Amino acid sequence: MNSTSQSMWEWLTWVFKRSNSGQCLLFCYALWWIWFSRNQYIHERKNTTGRALVLNIQRYMAEQEELKALKNNESICRRYGVQEDIPRVRILFDAAYDNKTFRSASNLVGWDLRGNLIVLKTVIHSNVPSPFAAEAYACLNGTKLGISLRTHSVKLMGDSRTVIRKCQETTTDKSATRAIIRDIQSKKSNFQELIFQYIHRSKNSYAHRLAKNALEKGETTYMREEELDRHTFALVEIWPRNPD
């Protein structure tokens, strides 16, 4: 702020010359998040508070440090012939289906590497032909959520064995939902690692209840940051912190 430079480029250069590497990273993260929040306000009318902005910057910096540590651990494991499956985010998905109205609700529950709840999302779909298609849409929404979280490693976990198997396959799907499956597989390039894992319905009961409730109300939800924090206390007794 003490710089007398007039142009933006001179100001940026002035900041970088007088900052260490950590300060430069913080500066870049802050600029990026401010610009991202500005675009959200202009295009989505979503206003981000100063506190939320600070938390986003701090969380992103912490994630980058964890990613560096994870890469170092993976390098050590490869060196000694040890393989570890440590995805950065786990997203559990499930769907509720109404065969009278042909509507479905996709519910997504996201957990970070430490087992902390980081995101809840429900999406309502119309003209869904079958329960299987409803599960496929839920998996597709989980993939899209992983992209929006800007994480490079995601494990998608669902209790539809058929959907998980089709997503794991590399051959062309010929089922009625091939367009959805193809859309899911086309998004794999957005990740360094995208794992599809089947889990028993008993481990996915909370996601199923949320999907069923969303379908009954016809409401879409998306909770992160401060809004999610206000609801976390209600989840502690329903589901343990680590879904694995």
Image (spheres, rainbow, N blue to C red):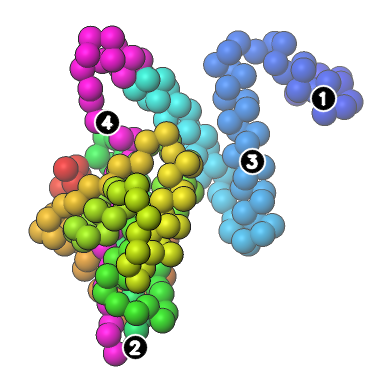
* Magenta region, residue range: 72-100
Task: Give the image location of residue 195, x and y in percent.
Answer: 30, 42
Report whether residue 213 is seen. Answer: no
- Identify the mark at residue 101; answer none if there is no mark: 2
Mark 3 against mark 4, which lies toward the viewer?
A: 4
Reply yes or no: does residue 223 show up in magenta: no
Residue linked to disc 1: 9
Q: Distance between the Cα atoms at labels 3 and 4?
A: 31 Å
Q: Residue at x 18, y 46 (%)?
A: 243
Instruction: State the residue position of label 3.
Output: 34
- Label 1: how many residues lie within 10 Å, few (<14), some (14-19) or many (20+)? few
| Disc 4 target residue | 86
Question: Mark 4 belongs to which amino acid?
Answer: Ile
How many marks overall? 4
Q: CA distance from mark 4 to mark 1?
A: 40 Å
Task: Specify whether 111 is left or right of 143.
Answer: left
Q: Amino acid at mark 3?
A: Ile
* 239 horizontally vs 149: left or right: left
Q: Which residue is at a point 50% across and 45% down the rendered structure image?
A: 52
Question: How far is disc 1 from disc 2 in space, using C-alphas?
Answer: 57 Å
Secondary structure state at the residue bearing disc 2:
loop
User: Which structural element holds mark 3?
Assistant: helix
Q: Upstream in the sequence, badge 3 or badge 4?
A: 3
Picture coordinates of residue 160, whole percent (x, y): 21, 61
* Mark 4 surroundings: few (<14), some (14-19) or many (≥20) residues within 10 A: few
Find residue 114 and report its horizontal and vertical position in percent: 26, 34
Could you tell which of marks 4 and 2 lies nearer the N-terminus?
4
